[in-house]
Amino acid sequence: MFTKTTLLSSAFRIRGAWSSLFGFVLFCLCLLLFRIWLTGRFFFLFLVWNLFLAIVPYLCTSFLRLRRWRNMRTIPFFTVLGCWLLFLPNSPYIITDLIHLQNELSVFPWYDLFLVFVFAFTGLLFGILSLWDVYQMLRERYSEAFSKVCLFIVCFLCGYGIYLGRFLRFNSWDVVSDPLALALAIGNSMGEPRMWFVTLAFGGFLSLLLLWGTAMMRTIGRTVSSSSD
């Protein structure tokens, strides 16, 4: 039974996680503000928007955890999960922003490399944590094997989403605003070798991160459990 005490406990855990994650976001913004002050240019300001989009998936899973998702009906539950899936590729997408280091406005190569890396790492961290949240939710509703298969499929869908965003320049909201163009682009991309490379490369990378994260979470769980006995 999902009690009020459980809800409060979940709220405190989420607030604690957000407190830690806020430090990463603040560090990103400080690095960017320092570069703006140093150069007088706003070239990398787009990273703020990209980071916000990367945070949206974690906002979705945090919402589910706070809204007693165990008692939610199937349609509302999967509607929020659908929004989560649409925005999830934005989390690893920031990695591809390294391409902007080739721009002539990137006047401090090493600083700019570190700046994009920190933004990319932070966005990826939010994405992996949201993946873990969804894995936990699916595992409680269904079997562990089913949950793993779903998450690995999601990882490769994420890789394909990165291809759609970086090379075909589609956004998450194009599913609603321009679904016909998106569907045509998806159909035409099936024979594109670059699409398969990007999908498999990023999908494989996210799958490995998910496996590592799952192993780490279990290790931490066992350590906490044994120390409390």
Image (cartoon, helix red, strand yellow):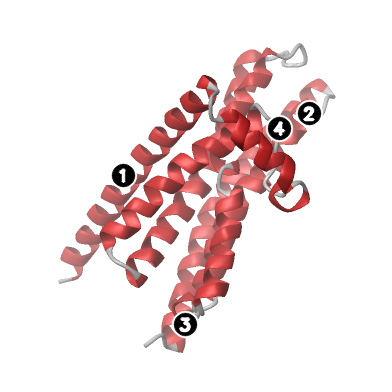
Earlier residue among tags 3 and 2: 2
**128 to 145, vertically: above or below:** above
Residue that badge 1 annotates: 211
| Mark 2, secondary structure of its residue | helix
Q: What separation in Å lies between label 4 and label 1 (alpha carbons)? A: 30 Å
In the drawing, what numbered circle is on residue 36?
2
Can you say which quadrant of the picture contains the N terminus? bottom left
Mark 4 neighbour density, 10 Å: few (under 14) some (14–19) many (20 or more): few
Q: What separation in Å lies between label 1 and label 3 (alpha carbons)? A: 28 Å
Residue 94 appears in the rendering: no
Q: What separation in Å lies between label 3 and label 2 (alpha carbons)? A: 47 Å
Q: What separation in Å lies between label 4 and label 3 (alpha carbons)? A: 38 Å
Earlier residue among tags 4 and 1: 4
Residue 193 appears in the rendering: yes
Mark 1 neighbour density, 10 Å: few (under 14) some (14–19) many (20 or more): some
Residue that badge 3 annotates: 71
| Mark 3, secondary structure of its residue | helix
* In-front residue for pair 87/3: 87
- Residue type at the position of mark 3: Asn
Earlier residue among tags 1 and 2: 2
Q: What separation in Å lies between label 2 and label 4 (alpha carbons)? A: 27 Å
In the drawing, what numbered circle is on residue 169?
4
Instruction: Please give the name of the residue rendered at 56% of the width and 48% of the height, measured from the top-left corner.
Output: 88
Earlier residue among tags 4 and 3: 3
Q: What separation in Å lies between label 1 and label 2 (alpha carbons)? A: 38 Å
| Mark 1, secondary structure of its residue | helix
Location of residue 182 in the rendering, given as x and y in whole percent from the top left corner: 69, 41
- Residue type at the position of mark 2: Ile
Mark 3 neighbour density, 10 Å: few (under 14) some (14–19) many (20 or more): few
